[in-house]
Image (cartoon, rainbow, N blue to C red):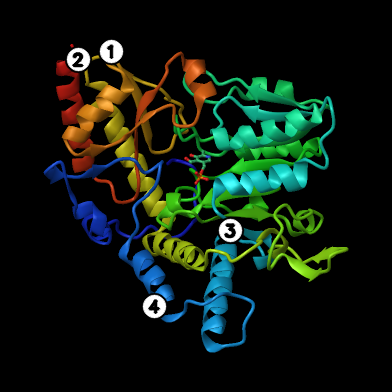
Amino acid sequence: MNAPLTGQPALAFDIDAIRAQFPILSEQVRGGRLAYLDNAATTQKPESVLAAIDDYYRHKNSNVHRAVHDLAERATTAYEGARDRIAQWFKVAREEIVFTRGTTEAINLVAYSFLRPRLQAGDEVLLTGMEHHSNIVPWQLVAKEKGAKIVAAPVLDDGSLDLEGWTALLNERTKFIAVVHVSNSLGTVNPVEQMIAAAKARGIPVLVDGAQSVAHIAIDFPALGADFYTCSAHKAYGPTGFGCLVAKRAILDAMPPWHGGGDMIRTVSFEESTWNEAPYRFEAGTPDMAGAVGFAAALDWIASVGLDAIAAHEHALLLEGTALLAAVPGLRMIGTAKNKGGILAFVMDGGHAQDIGTILDQYGVAVRTGHHCTMPLMARFGVPATVRASLAAYNNREDLEQLAKALHKASRLLA
Ligand code: PLP
């Protein structure tokens, strides 16, 4: 990805040493070598993350916050220590990290706890035409209930956002803005800094969906200036079912709870309950302690390699992959924006994406096919589905060559 990154020194990028840390990459699939190119859906996990989760269950597992015994203390220390690590990653205070099941839950939290009480009939929520369903449907549910409207900014033919069109949609009815940082279907990196500045000038709160940026672009949350940032651990070498909402403390403090249960309360009686402080107010019930530990370990792993180095590696692969795919007869790329992350999405003459995915699988190439939870975007490009190869730190030239070779075979079969 060619966005400016952390300023961390780029270590010598030893791709073989990196691949060796991911045991699943040596799995045989369909009797041969695996080329795992479905990283936008979920990434694989390095040994250090697997070990951290294993260590948690072997040596620390108990319930958090509520007991005085030794194991409960270990569990709480591990869980809250993970919050410290994650907060440090985003350059925020620990109280500004709310643990969730992932991006989807984090967006729903903001929709229900932050926006719902503020939204009125006639108000507008401004999105873009390239949002994931997770960044459409929660707003739609709340807007429907309140008689408010969802407005989506246009996407240009190359898959970049029509920034002028987006700006023209800002008006006095716009009560909230949500935007995907990096499109999971196109790879487009949106100009979120510019968008946030325009929103701030009008006093409009902004949520950035970071599902596809967290493992590729360094996030300095205070410098970014957004009100909310959401992400999922599993897209950043961490475990599934875990993620977080990053939000300014003053905003979280003013937000009501949205899930009721243990741990989110201060006092409970049958007449009335009072709420714990943020972020605990938003974390009802027994949390995913191993998930938190695994996410912190995943961020440690990224830091050990260097986000700059990973981004540079992925960008080089993106250029190489784009050139290899351009030579496949009948293949058309969907998403060619200048500022683009490691996504190669395409359609091919004579075959549905599903058929192409099935052929690629026969050659050990794991890609995603379908609408990628972006049905409005597929409609914009006039296709029902695309084939999507998506990159991560451990991908290498061989993966791309395996993909290209299989695509040439598919192209011959479909001709
Ligand atoms: N937003 C984007 C851009 C995504 O790519 C995804 C997942 O693919 C999500 C949101 C939802 O993430 P999760 O399913 O981890 O909650």
The vertical placement of 99 against 365, above or below, is below
x then y, percent, for residue 43: 37, 49
Q: Which residue is mark 2?
A: 414
Per the model, the C-alpha gap separating discs 4 and 3 is 29 Å
Q: Quadrant of residue 73?
A: bottom right
Q: Is residue 226 visible?
A: no
Which sits earlier in the primary sequence, circle 1 or circle 2? Answer: 1
Q: Are marks 3 and 2 in contact (CB under 8 Å)?
A: no
Which sits earlier in the primary sequence, circle 3 or circle 1? Answer: 3
* Crowding at mark 2 (Cα within 10 Å: few <14, some 14-19, many 20+): some
**Between marks 2 and 4 in the image, the one whose residue lies nearer the viewer:** 4
x then y, percent, for residue 13: 29, 56
The answer to whether residue 60 is left or right of residue 409 is: right
Q: Is residue 23 visible?
A: yes
Indicate which disc residue 90 carries: 3
Per the model, the C-alpha gap separating discs 2 and 4 is 52 Å
Q: Which residue is mark 1?
A: 349
